[in-house]
Image (cartoon, rainbow, N blue to C red):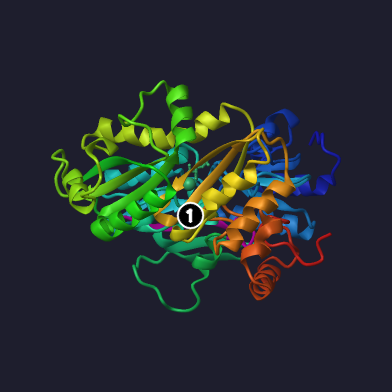
Amino acid sequence: LATPVEMDTDVLQLLAKVVGRDDLIVDRDLMGAYETDATGRFGERALCIVRPSSSDEVADVLKVCGRASTRVVIQGGNTGLAGGGVPCDGEVVVRMDHLNEIASHEGDPWHLVAGAGATLAEVREAARKAGLEFALDFPARDSATVGGMVATNAAGPTALRWGPMRAQLAGLEAVTATGAVLSRLVPVSKDNAGYDWPALIAGSEGTLAVVTRARLRLHTPPAARDVFMIGAANYDDAVGLTSCLRSGLGSRLEALDFIDRPSVELVCATRRLREPLPATHGVYLVGTVLTEHEGDGPALELLARELPDLPDEAIVGAVDGAGRRRLWEYREAINEALRARGEVHKYDVSLPLQRLPSFAAGLTEDLARRPELAVYLYGHLGDGNVHVNLLGVTGFDRALDDLILERVASLGGSIDAEHGVGLAKRDHLGLTRTDAELALMRDVKRMLDPVGILGSGRVVVSEERP
Ligand code: S2G
Ligand code: ZN
């Protein structure tokens, strides 16, 4: 093997024996694509990239690396935002591309079993072909994979109605760091026998075990969906509207996101879109309502009844596909528009809904001292999940992280809502988790990954870390 990396070639030779030479990449030029993430802030040089073709090959890769104490990072679609899926120096990157089979069982139409490497778009299409629907959807659908979505307990707008990825799991197959293949994919909807280890692996960000397959719940598609956008003067109004919408529409409210004024201006400029509403507003709510009839806009009648004081020019609805996509575009286009402006410094926090206005006000106060920063707030309002995105920060800014995440903690929120802790927030986990919880997490990590090869340094770091 030509090994341009200074490394004990035994590991590379052994890995080539497991996955085959064609699925072991050591060529420095080819590795680059797997060494940086979507934010451009994380990722160092990998030892190599390996692409196993089965759960057993994943197990053998982990056994080889465990024996050599060689650290490993698992990578799905590389859409991660917290540094959890790209290598720290010298790690083996395990790509899950080959484990992408999707199987549906005629005997059990309400589930499908997808390989970790299958994309969200492929899962959604397989569900559609079966006349059903998979609950989650978000812009990264063509790259985000099932394995990464389970590992980060991914969510997105529709998690308001259907819950995050963990709630979609009806079974799981995963490989532990010691190479044990755990499989719980039996065709049942309810399985309460013994500890729910799949629920523990979901959200563990590749630090406890490697997800190889998932049994996913599907549901009957609603008869129709309507989309609305409402302009609110400020976050107090936005939160008031949220309470009305949630209590008035109940489970018919599938998604309720928000966008602040700077984000609307950015998207209108970038995508050359006209203003979404006749007047400008401080905060824009975008929501999807599950309805019984295509096209006759019952959502707007529902909304008119729930929000009698809302002026007509502050709300717009869409009942056809193009109209629905157009309204959601103002929300879905933000991340790409921001990335086009340069390095984006991101926080993904959740707040008790009633405290969201004071978080936003406090943030404005905090950042007034940093006039060079451009601040964009948007996210999943119904869940109290705020994506704080800043332009003007280069690299890491610990003081800024402390300022924002300590404010979240002081308001009883969480430093991470759906993107994962990864490397980005591992030093702040103690802000919103107690010492007893952190001790338990370390014990679970030590038990499942005794050599410490899986996702080392991500999420929960051992006390003795310098
Ligand atoms: C969102 C998507 C990922 C990103 O916009 O809801 O969770 O790029 C984010 O921030
Ligand atoms: Zn989000």
In the displayed structure, 148 sits above or below 374; it is below
Q: Is residue 112 visible?
A: no
Residue 18 on the magenta span: no
Residue 95 lies, in percent from the top left, at 60, 44
Q: Is residue 336 visible?
A: yes
Residue 356 lies, in percent from the top left, at 48, 54
Give the magenta-colored segment's residue range.
204-218
- Kindly indicate the quadrant of the structure image that contains residue 373: top right
Asked whether mark 1 lies closer than 8 Å to ligand 2, one says no
- Kindly indicate the quadrant of the structure image that contains residue 370: top right
Residue type (three-letter) at the residue carrying disc 1: Leu
Left or right relative to 176: residue 351: left
Residue 459 lies, in percent from the top left, at 66, 58
Q: Which residue is mark 1?
A: 356
In the displayed structure, 214 sits above or below 182; it is above
Q: Nearer the viewer, residue 19 or 115?
A: 115
Identify the residue shown where x is 26% and y is 32%: 323
Q: Nearer the viewer, residue 366 or 440?
A: 366
